[in-house]
Image: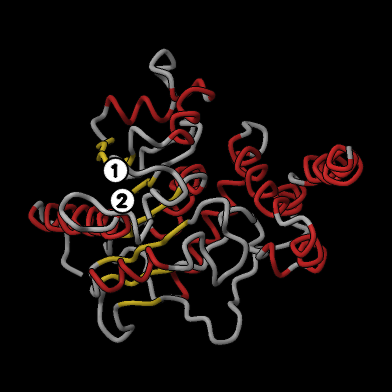
Amino acid sequence: MNDFLFWACVVGPALLAEALLARYEVLAYGAGWRAPASELPKGVPYARGAAPDSPPGAYLVYLDGIGKRRVRDSRDGGQLVEALIAGAPELRVLGQVQPYSPLADPLADRPVWAWLRRRIGLLLFLHNVMQTFVAADHRYRPLYNRAVGSQIATQLRLAGYQPDSGMPVVLLSYSGGAQVTTGAVDELYTRLRCPLLLITLGGFHNGANDLTHAEHLHQLTSAHDRIEQIGTWIFPQRWRLFRRSGWNRAVRAGKITVHRLDPATHFGAQSYISPTAQLPDGRSHLDHTADTVIAIIRAHHSTTVAQGDPLP
């Protein structure tokens, strides 16, 4: 009974309020009331990995899953980013983008959420879940896409990216970050005119966003990933029947390549980024994922160079 009262009197109203307010940021952006923040907290670099005094092999922007709450954190404590930097020192990696805030306002740094986090930590995740659905909603999607695309472009420029340079930009996304990543393609291409490679890891997205300006999308998935499977069921644009959706047009154009990371799960002890779960060859799931991402980037880069694209 006490649990019921807690959910009915405390969590229920909080969820209702969040459902009503989830659209505030994207509407504030669209109305011009607020602009996305670009300055990072003191001591946080705009990029890590390849030194800024020499051209990197590519810029990699990591958009985390719904656990993303602030500039510094990620669902795995940054282990995937660390593994990518260690395995591919030629990459310049950005992990500070706030995929669930069109205004680039870290959730955990807001006073009201800092208070709620100490009392109802689940609401932090539910906020980001709702933002994912706002990003997928056809009424708000164009504004959301423009806002986050602008945020990514700004952070890339601050990290040293030069528009029209031909330098590859890789957008690596986890879970709900795929909705934001696929939506940011047009704005990012418009602002930077850059070659865009997308890699989704357990990607949860509605398939409505246009991928025309993406060179390719690599889908890292697993038969044990129930969350990604739910996304393919609940969003009609992912169904083959909707041939004109952005996703199905990309499939027919040969832009989607699927990579199996079985037996990884979406989260938990057997997740894609687990440092303890092991494969028969002795590698951890984290190592397997990082190795796959690095191999995709290097293979794509060598292919584009062979086709005559400028060297970085």
Secondary structure of the residue carrying numbered label 2: strand
Quadrant assignment, res 148:
bottom right
User: Which amino acid type corresponds to the residue marked 2 in the rendered image?
Assistant: Leu
Residue assigned mark 2: 197
x and y percentages locating residue 245 in the rendered image: 44, 24
From the viewer's side, name the closer residue of 34 and 92: 92
Can you say whether 125 is above or below 251 in the image?
below
Q: CA distance from mark 1 to mark 2?
A: 8 Å
Residue assigned mark 1: 218
Secondary structure of the residue carrying numbered label 1: strand
Can you say whether 280 is above or below 212 in the image?
below
**Relative horizontal placement of residue 187, taking residue 19 as reference (left or right):** left
**Quadrant including the N terminus:** top right
For residue 127, the mark is none
Which residue appears at 40% of the width and 49% of the height?
271
Which residue appears at 92% of the width and 42% of the height?
9
Q: Residue furthest top?
A: 241
x and y percentages locating residue 192 in the rendered image: 40, 60
**Relative horizontal placement of residue 144, taking residue 34 as reference (left or right):** left
Quadrant assignment, res 294:
bottom left
Which residue appears at 65% of the width and 40% of the height?
134
Question: Neighbour class for label 1 at 10 Å: few (<14), some, many (≥20)?
Answer: some
**Relative horizontal placement of residue 4, taking residue 152 as reference (left or right):** right
